[in-house]
Amino acid sequence: MTLAFWQAGNLNAAARSVRDWARRDPERPAPQRFAARIYEDMGAIDLAAEAADRVAARAPSDADAWERVGRLRLRLLQSEAARSALETARRLQPSVEGLLDLALAYHLTGDVGGEVAATEQAVGLDRDNAGAWSRHAHALARTDRISEGIEAAERALQLNPDDAEVAELLERLRDALPRVLPAA
């Protein structure tokens, strides 16, 4: 019933149905997964986050569940809670998207080192992901690792030559590169 209501776009009926399902089957994560998605579609992000927390509690070894908690906590601007959930997902089974979300959580908490480490792991997982290289270049730009930032920006532009933001970043990084006088 829940799925039928949800697919039909009757979110209120879907929410009632999923609450009934969750009461009937309280130990399984499936009804809570549906609840999180339905509440998110309704725009009730706080309720979606609570349901996602219940999924993670019922399936603690499910990295996707922890990533979802992290994403929803980011939407609620709860950076520390998001970072904690995304770190759990990283330990269980890292994914590029989860690592980039973790990098955002670190960025929001002001931890540049954590942000760089997360983006570095993301590009290590998928060497052909232009978005990961872009985020890695932006993270490196906030450090003194200018040469590495230039390399990351160049790689991002190789993969997506139309990214004007990365092209601008590359130009700024090249301008910031220390100049050396030639030997006499």
Image (cartoon, rainbow, N blue to C red):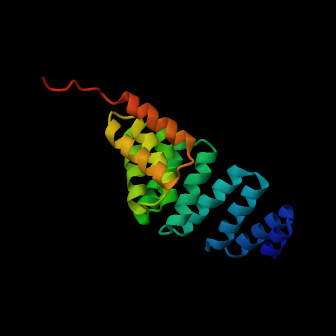
Q: How many marks?
A: 0
Tell me the quadrant of the picture where the N terminus can be found: bottom right
Residue 108, visible in the rendered structure = no
User: Is any atom of residue 41 visible in this view?
Assistant: yes
- The quadrant of the image that shows the C terminus is top left
Q: Quadrant of residue 171?
A: top left
> Could you say where residue 80 lies in the image, as x and y percent from the top left?
50, 43
Q: Residue furthest front?
A: 184
In the image, taking residue 3 as reference, residue 70 lies left or right, namely left
Residue 48 x/y as whole percent: 68, 56
Query: Closer to the camera, 156 or 22?
Result: 156
Residue at x 44%, y 38% (from the top left corner): 170
Is residue 69 found left or right of 169 in the rendered image?
right
Residue plotted at (41% across, 36% down): 141
Residue 98 spot, x, y in % from top left: 50, 57
Task: Name which residue lies at 44% across and 31% down.
Answer: 172
Q: Residue 15 sits in which quadrant?
A: bottom right
What residue is rendered at 68% in x and 50% in y?
46
18 relative to 74, above or below: below
